[in-house]
Image (cartoon, rainbow, N blue to C red):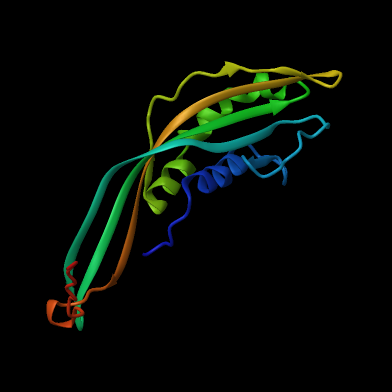
Amino acid sequence: MTVAWREPVKVLADVLTAELELPAGHIVLTNQKWPIPKDQGLYIAIGTISSKVVGNNNYLRDAVGGAEEVQQIVVDEMVQIDALSFNADARVRKEEILMALASQACLRAQAVYGFQIARIPQGFMNVGSLEETAQLNRFTTTIIIKSIRTKVKTADYYETFLEPEVTQNV
């Protein structure tokens, strides 16, 4: 079964929505001009903080009718997950996020979409603040995701390459 590549943060958003039984609109990817809601309940924000390429492969393989070029890249991403609420939900339910990341649904998603979450996540940091006249409960944690992305295309043979052009400065 071949599955199209998806950003790991989008897969995580789907997993957290299902595992935490969040209503529509209660999970968002960062940098989307999303205002902090004023109602009660748990909200989750997910975003990539940084990424580092740890592998980059390019090789040829035999295929029907010729050869294929296989390009693969392996990336470590640091992902930040924020739990927010104006009631106690963020404080009380924050550990459910870690439980969801270790769930069977999340393990299946990792296998299907070709990524892996590091087994020991960071603890939660309380980064609550006063928003207008209400206290925003906000807890943040980071996880590391290792993902692989593969791209396959028809390969040119040496005899089909364009003839090189040589120029000289005189």
**Place of residue 150 in the rendered image (x, y in percent of width and height, measured from the top left):** 32, 58
Q: Residue furthest front?
A: 170
In front of the other: 132 or 160:
160
Image vertical order of residue 151 relative to residue 17, above or below: below
**Place of residue 105 in the rendered image (x, y in percent of width and height, measured from the top left):** 48, 44
Q: How many marks?
A: 0
Image vertical order of residue 25 relative to residue 137, above or below: below
- Quadrant in the rendering for residue 46: top right
Residue 76 lies left or right of residue 56; in this view the side is right
Residue 116 lies left or right of residue 106; in this view the side is left
Q: Quadrant of the C terminus?
A: bottom left
In front of the other: 40 or 137:
137
In front of the other: 167 or 150:
167
Q: Residue furthest left?
A: 159
**Place of residue 23 in the rendered image (x, y in percent of width and height, measured from the top left):** 72, 43
In front of the other: 28 or 90:
28
- Quadrant in the rendering for residue 88: top right
Image vertical order of residue 63 relative to residue 58, above or below: below
Query: What residue is rendered at 25% in x and 63% in y?
Result: 70
Image vertical order of residue 163 relative to residue 108, above or below: below
Query: What residue is rendered at 86% in x and 18% in y?
Result: 133
Query: What residue is rendered at 35% in x and 43% in y?
Result: 75
Residue 64 lies left or right of residue 25; in this view the side is left
**Place of residue 169 in the rendered image (x, y in percent of width and height, measured from the top left):** 19, 66
Q: Quadrant of the N terminus?
A: bottom left
